[in-house]
Amino acid sequence: MKHEAIISQMTLEEKLSMLSGDGPWRTQAIPRFGVPSITVSDGPHGLRKPNEKSVAVNDSVKATCFPTAVTVAASWDKDLAKTLGETIAEECLAEDVGILLGPGVNIKRSPLCGRNFEYFSEDPYLAGYIASAFINGVQSKGVGTSLKHFACNNQEERRLSISSTVDMRTLRELYLTQFEIAVKNSHPYTLMCSYNKVNKVYSSENKLLLTDILRNEWGYSGVVMSDWGAVNDRARGVPAGLDLEMPGCNGKNDRCVIDAVNSGKLDVKYVDQAVDNMLDLVFRCQKNAQPGYTYSIEKHNEIAQKVAEESAVLLKNENNILPLDKNKKILVLGALAETPRYQGAGSSHVNSHKITSLLDGLDALGVRYEYAPGYTLDSKKSSVKAREAAVALARNYDTILMCIGLTDEYEAEGFDRLTLDLPQSQLDLMTEITKLSKNIVVNLQCGSPVTMPWLSNVQGLLLSYLGGQATGGAAANLLYGMANPSGKLAETFPLALEDTPCYRYFPGDGRSVLYREGVYVGYRYYTTAQKDVLFPFGYGLSYTSFQYDKLDLKSTQYHDGDAVEFSVTVSNTGDKDGKEVVEVYVHPHDPKIDRPDRELKAFKKVFVKAHSSETVSFSLSKRDFCYYDVDSKAFVLDQGKYDIIVAKNVMDSSLVATVEFVDGNTKDKHLSINSWYNHPSDREITKSEFAELLRMDLPERMIAPKKGEFKGEHLIADLMPTSGLARGIAKIARFGIRTVTHVKDNDPGLEMGYRCFIYTPLYKLPAFGYVLSKDSLEGVTDVFNGHPFKGTGIVIKDFTNQLKKHIKKKK
Ligand code: BGC
């Protein structure tokens, strides 16, 4: 232990004080040992340092709002991700923030996940390396990061209680690999465990995840902190590898750990180890602090715009309608052109220094245009008049720039989307305008895939995703050719929700969600099942064209452990300078286990001048050819042949070469139950087959508790279908949150707070600052269980005690 000298002098109480927060955003100091308190703040695409006294999630210090993770991943640019990290770190230094709570690297299992805008990709390799570059950037400035949410937090629905049920191979190959890449390559100061359970065990007390894999296998030596309110039982969490509980617990959970140590149930060595990890962290942050640090708001805005420009994806450009001609007056339709959607709602929300809309961007370029909103942003208000006015104007123009997208109401932390469709008012406008047979260019603003019934009737489509505060400037530059698009999708855009591989299993039955599609997530499914998609993973156009030649392999035969090295020539065959993302996939010829058709194993973004070429080199390691073998509990290489595919997107095979590994595993590992994997569209894997794959019993089905069965672990939502009282409490809570936060009824922050209330196990509610204490909650469960007098008595007694304590404190 590094800090034994201090730890040996600490009382058990002092030790435990270090292992939970001092309120929501700080760690606890111990002045007698010179142990400082450090500040942690969200994260991830800009700084959200809350105004301590405020309860509103959006009330934080001014900061630069950069493009969100989904956007940054579409840049496929590690250098850019690093620059972004360095830039955000400067704002952390200026605000004396020691740890930035990000990046989030959860895999986009379903495009419905409400928080997908905060995550990078459906592919662990891409997510892992972009996250790694971002962490390297932040930490190069002496600010720590928190890699989150570990693990399998792939939906918002019941995120505080759901058990993600995943077989070990899928867990290792898909849901942990990106964490592994980031941990091994970038050593984040902290890692945040998720709210949910993984295979029935809460992440915050999951020894397999937090100790066996994270620390023992990957060699992680930083701090593991809980997500806010993710602790279930601290006395179980500490020996499993949890160091820090966030937010603070007012000493309550510390007490549980102290009791466990004093009663001999818990070895104090686990506490000491956690304290050692914490001391390392806080001293490191203290040393790195730079009081008085300042940054240039203007320069950071320029970087935000650059990231947005390099990340936007050109999805359609029929007859080269783009770039637009500056000398021609156009009609701009869509309220999002004036009020952009440029970030997501929830804990990542940044209070931006400034916001540049598309209209601002067009003004800066001196473009001539007329504008009409065409729809209202508030779904509660009618769009009929706005639409009629837009259609009337549209008749006078040849070229129409339509700005559409998802509003905050549709995607936010705390709840998932129910459909992939755009808001109806926008679809109605699209229907009317596309009927007029004009030249139509769409600028799309959203944090995850949407369906596009209008696609064949528009000529141009630029996807800005959520482009940060400078999104409008970036979009205008791209639409008018001041910048050349170079982003590519880091996720598949499916044709329909029903096509998504987890469609039948997402978001589970209330208690558990079965990951029955296994490793066949995103393109791994679409390519293997040969299913058509709207836009494939890795897809994106440019205003120039690229050609790949000369796949030059060092050798075609390899031994276990050899690096596979090769280069390709990328030529810019068009008239404009541009950047191209070169993607490398591996396809096994005759796998000994059912495997996806191809998997991404390398990528590089290169700048190539018009009419010239660049040579791009790659090196693949043994791991890039392996799968996880549950029997040997290791990543295994099969002997045999593999195609190296150099491609423009996952459905492309521009250049292919075959290599052979002459040693490695030769035994067949096909499972008969896995035959589904070869024909994933034919039938679904049954529950019993899935249980066999899991090698454990499936969790019991969720059955709503009846009167008399309600316990602290249950949720208000569990009772709402059958109890008028529960529905009443939920209504009051919604009203209360709305009143305290002063927001509109369809505000995503209200929805998030409300969902948090009804979907949080009752015993955890105090961690979220809800007014009821633990004792009162016992009273409430009694009331639900049909003992109104007993329950109310407990609540009154508890309130009286608390009041007395409060008065005593004031005196
Ligand atoms: C989110 C985390 C976030 C934390 C603090 C949680 O609800 O899941 O991502 O860092 O709150 O705001």
Image (spheres, rainbow, N blue to C red):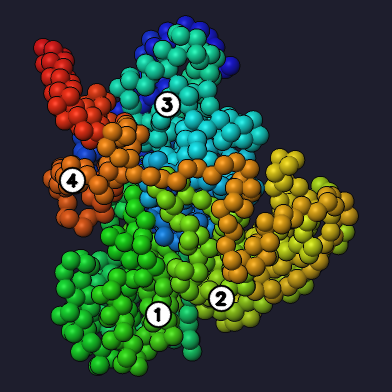
Labels 4, 3: front one:
4
- Name the residue carrying label 2: 532
Among the two numbered marks 4 and 3 on one chain, the one whose residue lies closer to the N terminus: 3
Among the two numbered marks 4 and 2 on one chain, the one whose residue lies closer to the N terminus: 2
Above/below status of 368 relative to 760: below
The answer to whether the residue labelled 3 contacts the one labelled 1, judged by CB atoms less than 8 Å apart, is no
- Neighbour tally class for label 4: few under 14, some 14-19, many 20 plus, Cα within 10 Å: few
- Name the residue carrying label 4: 724
Residue 671: image quadrant is bottom right
Among the two numbered marks 1 and 2 on one chain, the one whose residue lies closer to the N terminus: 1
Labels 3, 1: front one:
3
Labels 4, 1: front one:
4
The answer to whether the residue labelled 4 contacts the one labelled 2, judged by CB atoms less than 8 Å apart, is no
Q: Position of residue 153 (x, y in %)?
A: 46, 46
Q: Amino acid at mark 4?
A: Gly
Element under label 4?
A: helix
Distance (Cα) linking label 4 and label 2 = 47 Å
- Name the residue carrying label 1: 453
The answer to whether the residue labelled 2 contacts the one labelled 3, judged by CB atoms less than 8 Å apart, is no
- Neighbour tally class for label 1: few under 14, some 14-19, many 20 plus, Cα within 10 Å: few
Residue 357 is left or right of residue 211, and the answer is: left
Q: Position of residue 155 (x, y in %)?
A: 43, 51
- Name the residue carrying label 3: 233
Distance (Cα) linking label 1 and label 2 = 15 Å
Residue 180 is left or right of residue 8, and the answer is: right
Element under label 3?
A: loop
Among the two numbered marks 3 and 1 on one chain, the one whose residue lies closer to the N terminus: 3
Distance (Cα) linking label 4 and label 1 = 41 Å
Q: Residue at x 79, y 68 (%)?
A: 657
Depth check: 258 or 329 in front?
Answer: 258
Q: Residue at x 83, y 51 (%)?
A: 667
Q: Amino acid at mark 3?
A: Asp
